[in-house]
Image: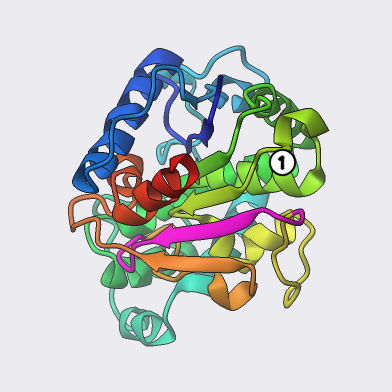
């Protein structure tokens, strides 16, 4: 029986469900091991592989079809959404420092408008090693989920099928945290499959960004809410470029933030988040 449903983030078109499940299980077991807890039982984690459903109508998203890649020009709608999201996370002092600089396009698409490029450069000052470019790529796919309702509904339906009567923990990473939250708040899972759900864990969640929340029809200032009885633990790294380095607790009294340090290599990494103590503690508390 399934005890944990995981919802992965973007960029898994070249990874199978089996490989993702193995990777997530190893990471979760690493965190449990550091707490002297046993490994997950076989079959305890269900990880639906939803990526192909969000592939702009294609049956799969191969490398040659990755229309979210930085080499693919942004549509006007994408540019507007991503630029607004960047304006919401960029520090004004960083933007001021790059206003007078010559545009440094090394590593940045030449076709990006100057204002867009300056926002990315400003974000890179806060999150070096390409944080701005990675933010753009991620926000393009987040926007596609938010504004392609037919495909988004297919994604939610696939994830909903992963729940069982014994599912007690839901873990969402990056865009997966948006999908998991959206699914739970909509009540689209059969009631007998959510009766045991006690905790939502979000990791590296872009729900911190107002543009993302507005895409879920959550007005500015409106608190994030879950169905009654479900606790919410949000795990974030201050160095995570997708979250803007902030948590969610200021947006809702229902959210408990847990700050972690995933290192400088890739602070947004799902596997680094999954092996952290706050995630392991939720699982351990459920199985005691």
Residue 153: percent from left, percent from top: 76, 31
Q: What element carries label 1?
A: helix
| Up/down of 155 relative to 174, above or below | above
Q: Quadrant of residue 157?
A: top right
Residue 160: percent from left, percent from top: 69, 28
Q: Nearer the viewer, residue 167 or 154?
A: 167
| Up/down of 170 relative to 51, above or below | below
Q: In this view, does 232 lie to the left or right of 229?
A: left
Residue 257: percent from left, percent from top: 47, 68
Q: In which quarter of the image is residue 277?
A: bottom left
Residue 229 sits inside the magenta stretch: yes
The residue where tag 1 is placed is 183
Q: Residue at x 73, y 78 (%)?
A: 221
Considering every residue shown, the one lying at the far front of the view is 288
Q: Residue at x 29, y 57 (%)?
A: 105
Q: How many numbered badges does the structure rendering display? A: 1
* Residue 109 seen in the current view: no
Extent of the magenta region: 227-240
């Amino acid at each position: 029986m399934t005890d944990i449903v995981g919802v992965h983030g973007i960029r898994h078109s070249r990874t199978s469900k089996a490989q993702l499940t193995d990777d997530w299980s190893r990471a979760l077991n690493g965190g449990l091991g550091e707490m002297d807890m046993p490994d997950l039982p076989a079959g305890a984690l269900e990880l639906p592989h939803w990526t192909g459903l969000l592939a702009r109508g294609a049956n799969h998203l191969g490398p040659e079809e990755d229309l979210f890649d930085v080499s693919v020009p942004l549509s006007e709608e994408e540019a507007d959404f991503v630029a607004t999201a960047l304006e919401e996370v960029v520090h004004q002092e960083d933007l001021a420092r790059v206003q007078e600089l010559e545009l440094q396009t090394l590593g940045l698409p030449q076709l990006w408008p100057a204002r867009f490029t300056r926002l990315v450069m400003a974000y890179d000052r806060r999150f070096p090693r390409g944080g701005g470019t990675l933010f753009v790529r991620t926000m393009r796919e987040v926007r596609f989920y938010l504004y392609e309702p037919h495909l988004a509904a297919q994604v939610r339906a696939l994830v909903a099928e992963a729940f069982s009567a014994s599912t007690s923990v839901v873990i969402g990473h990056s865009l997966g945290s948006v999908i998991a939250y959206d699914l739970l708040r909509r009540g689209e899972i059969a009631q007998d499959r959510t009766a045991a759900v006690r905790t939502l864990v979000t990791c590296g969640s872009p729900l911190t960004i107002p543009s993302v929340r507005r895409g879920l029809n959550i007005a500015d200032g409106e608190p994030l809410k879950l169905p009654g009885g479900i606790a919410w633990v949000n795990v974030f790294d201050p160095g995570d470029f997708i979250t803007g380095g902030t948590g969610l607790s200021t947006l809702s009294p229902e959210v408990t933030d847990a700050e972690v340090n995933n290192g400088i290599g890739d602070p947004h990494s799902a596997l680094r988040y999954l092996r952290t103590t706050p995630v392991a503690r939720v699982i351990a508390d459920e199985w005691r």
